[in-house]
Amino acid sequence: MQAVDAVIARRLDSGVPLVAEVSRYIIASGGKRLRPALLLLICGALGYRGEQRFNLAAVVEFIHTATLLHDDVVDESTLRRGRATANERFGNPASVLVGDFLYSRAFQMMLDAHDMRVMEILAEATNVIAEGEVMQLMNMHDPDLDEAGYLQVIRSKTAKLFEASARLGAVLAGAGPEVERACAVYGQALGTAFQVIDDVLDYDGEVEAMGKNLGDDLREGKVTLPLIAAMHRGTTDQRALIRGAVETGALDALDAIVAIVRDTGALQVAHAAAAAEAQRAIDAARSLPENDHAGGLIQLAASLLQRRH
């Protein structure tokens, strides 16, 4: 990861000072670096030790960072990882344009791999992620969104880059189609579990630990699995209260809605869904060669269920 960070620092160089300033601000804000770590673990599990793994790990982090910059503008977010968002500090235009720079720099860097399969994976992933963003926008303030629609969004918007990161590791290692598919399943399942737990924490986390505001999803009109489960399990009055809050984005009833989500067992429903995805990831990782890196992949999937931020 230190080698990846060195690549990130070097490739953030730009002749435009604001580009470097905004990029470094968000890159240095303490993200989990899960997607680069996933790519490195897959490479390790499959025996690839080449330098290109550092370059492509930086590429997926740049793509992820670009999506964060754009997301925070769309969502009008003010806090991420315990700091002011880039759009809050530098303004929306700078955030959008620097996000564009990071996307284009990522595509410059992926050319270094000299592999059309790498290009294919990342081109498809960025397209699916963009579609997921638009789907989420269309679903805003829609209290009738069901679990299938919710999963379609998070598998496109979040899990797709996890899947691509895992595929890239397999491609770099020269793995066959069956192993690449297993890696893709692992990445998609891990990314899905990660996002479900993230959505749980919006109703069950601590602001200091999460580094973002409790109730942000509700304010933005996002219907996530905890709300879907609460509406299924709640009383008529409870459903009406949640529907009204989703439709308006008002936080007046936030405390009552958090209580409903907790009292109806909706958090347990969401945790069970995340656990099923984590198990799917673990099963996929067990098809890889047995070594410390594959063991790390299994531990990573299991550890998601203990996330508190």
Image (cartoon, rainbow, N blue to C red):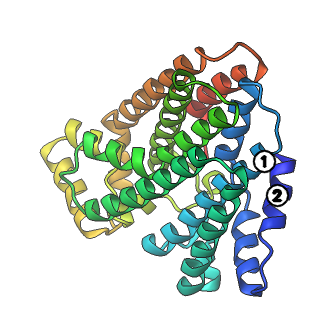
Residue at the extreme left: 236
Judge left or right: residue 221 versus residue 14.
Answer: left
The percent position of residue 31, horizontal first and vertical second, equals 69, 55
**The disc labelled 1 sits on which kind of residue?**
Phe
Q: Nearer the viewer, residue 244 or 15?
A: 15
Residue positioned 64% across, 45% down in the render: 35
Q: Nearer the viewer, residue 59 or 297?
A: 59
- Can see residue 307? no
The percent position of residue 301, horizontal first and vertical second, equals 59, 28
Q: Secondary structure at mark 1?
A: helix
Please give the count of numbered marks on the rendered protein: 2
Q: Which residue is mark 1?
A: 54
Q: Is residue 120 above or below residue 14?
A: above
Residue positioned 60% across, 42% down in the render: 165
| Rendered image quadrant of residue 20 | bottom right
Residue positioned 40% across, 49% down in the render: 156
Q: Is residue 303 above or below residue 243?
A: above
Q: Which residue is mark 2?
A: 7
